[in-house]
Amino acid sequence: MAGTYPVDGKLSMQDLAATLTSKEQLEFMQLTGLAIDTTQPRNQATFINQSNQLGKLAIVAKGAASPGTKILSPNVYISGAKTDVDVYRLPTNPPAASS
């Protein structure tokens, strides 16, 4: 269901991306916002309903390169510390690895 949900502020970038991706895919939603919860050390993720399958999310340090399309650049809790990050939507069909 669309809305805003609390997300643990102690997760690593990879675990936060996996948690948000899982919520999107299991509940047919799309991440539209990610921010620090001002009442306690955790994050708030905002979602809208989405009927299409979306690519996974990747969260990297602000300014770091990542495949996909940058969708957000929030300040969030990562491993318990406030951190500037970029959130990317990865392609649904990544290019095949060359041998």
Image (cartoon, rainbow, N blue to C red):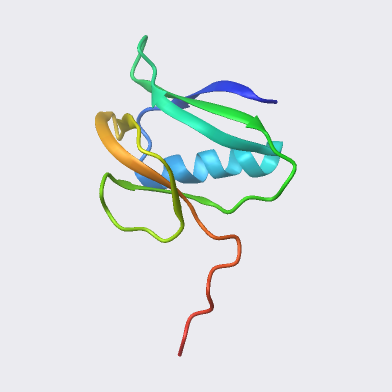
User: Looking at the rendering, in which quadrant would you find the C terminus?
Assistant: bottom left
User: Looking at the rendering, in which quadrant would you find the N terminus?
Assistant: top right
**Left or right of residue 63, residue 58 in this image:** right
Task: In the displayed orientation, state which residue is furthest to the bottom.
Answer: 99
**Left or right of residue 75, residue 47 in this image:** right
Task: In the displayed orientation, state which residue is furthest to the right.
Answer: 51
Question: Which residue is more in the foreground, 41 or 33?
Answer: 33
**Left or right of residue 81, residue 28 in this image:** right
Q: Quadrant of residue 48?
A: top right
**Left or right of residue 95, residue 12 in this image:** left
Tell me what residue is drawn at x 37 percent, y 9 percent: 39
Which x, y percent locates residue 36? 36, 22
Tell me what residue is drawn at x 54 percent, y 52 percent: 56
Q: Quadrant of residue 65?
A: bottom left
Which x, y percent locates residue 61? 27, 46
Tell me what residue is drawn at x 50 percent, y 46 percent: 18
